[in-house]
Amino acid sequence: MRIAPVGRFAGAPEGFRPGDIDPGCRSLVVVACRFPLGTLQAASNVPYTLVRNRLVDRLDTLTCTLAAALETEGITAMPIPSAEPYEHWDAARRHGRGILSLKHAAVLAGLGVMGKNTLLINERYGNMLWLGAVLVGVDLEPDPLAAYEACLAKCTICLDACPQHALDGTTIDQRRCRERSISVTEGGGWVLSCNTCRKVCPQHAGLKRPHR
């Protein structure tokens, strides 16, 4: 868990800042749960999909429980969904946005840094974190921003490995990504069928050496 003051979000896109969701927000609490590394070793992506879905449930339960506990202390609190629904959807680009970017919130709370694969990278847990958040109506002691770098300057492993060429080192083309990353099975249900950018990252299990 890490905490960011609302003032750190001044540079976020208009309409997607904590204060746009709740004008009374003063702080943001960001929480995370870790994927088991074994999900990347499976020949099938079904275990990875299972874990993702359970982490969404776990984080949403956690943030709702935290918000309720804070409000018993007289503190206004609002949980943010850890995944869907996307209220903002660009059909032509197949580009979805949550009401708040949890990855950017995690960076601003000091939980990690953004990688070239557009995944949050934490010093200890690499890019194997799923995120949730709670908007809080009081000033909380903020955590410092992460002072390390995750991606080496010349590293392009994730960009080169992406089968859809959806990464440019800064952003992701969601239309290209979604064409391969989610598939519907004939037997029913869906699978997160591509996690290449997470898997090939040299730092996916945590930083292999100190970075300054």
Image (cartoon, rainbow, N blue to C red):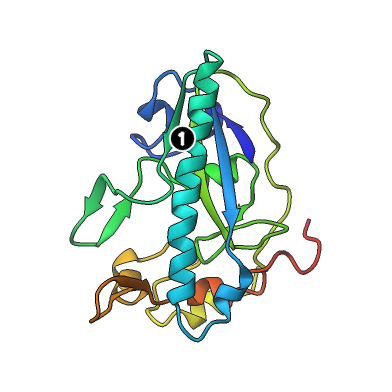
Q: Can residue 40 be seen by looking at this rendering?
A: yes
User: Where residue 107 sits: x, y (%)?
Assistant: 58, 46
Q: Residues within 10 Å of mark 1 (few under 14, many from 20)?
A: some
The quadrant in which the N terminus is found is top right
Could you tell me which residue is drawn at 54 percent across and 71 percent down? 198
Three-letter amino acid code at the position of disc 1: Cys
Q: Can residue 156 be seen by looking at this rendering?
A: no
Image quadrant of residue 114? bottom right
* Vertical order, 200 against 132 (above or below): below
Residue farthest along the top direction in this orientation: 74
Horizontally, residue 212 falls left or right of residue 197, namely: right
Residue on which disc 1 sits = 64
Could you tell me which residue is drawn at 66 percent across and 56 percent down? 122
The quadrant in which the C terminus is found is bottom right
Residue farthest along the left direction in this orientation: 92
Horizontally, residue 39 falls left or right of residue 212, namely: left
The one nearer the camera, 161 or 55, is 55
User: Where residue 178 sits: x, y (%)?
Assistant: 31, 70
The one nearer the camera, 193 or 100, is 193
The one nearer the camera, 172 or 77, is 77
Could you tell me which residue is drawn at 26 percent across and 46 percent down? 88
* Vertical order, 53 against 26 (above or below): below
Image quadrant of residue 87? top left
Residue farthest along the right direction in this orientation: 210
Residue farthest along the front direction in this orientation: 187
Image quadrant of residue 175? bottom left
* Vertical order, 180 against 22 (above or below): below
User: Where residue 6 sits: x, y (%)?
Assistant: 53, 28
Please tell me whether mark 1 sits on a helix, a strand or a loop: helix
User: Where residue 168 sits: x, y (%)?
Assistant: 45, 69
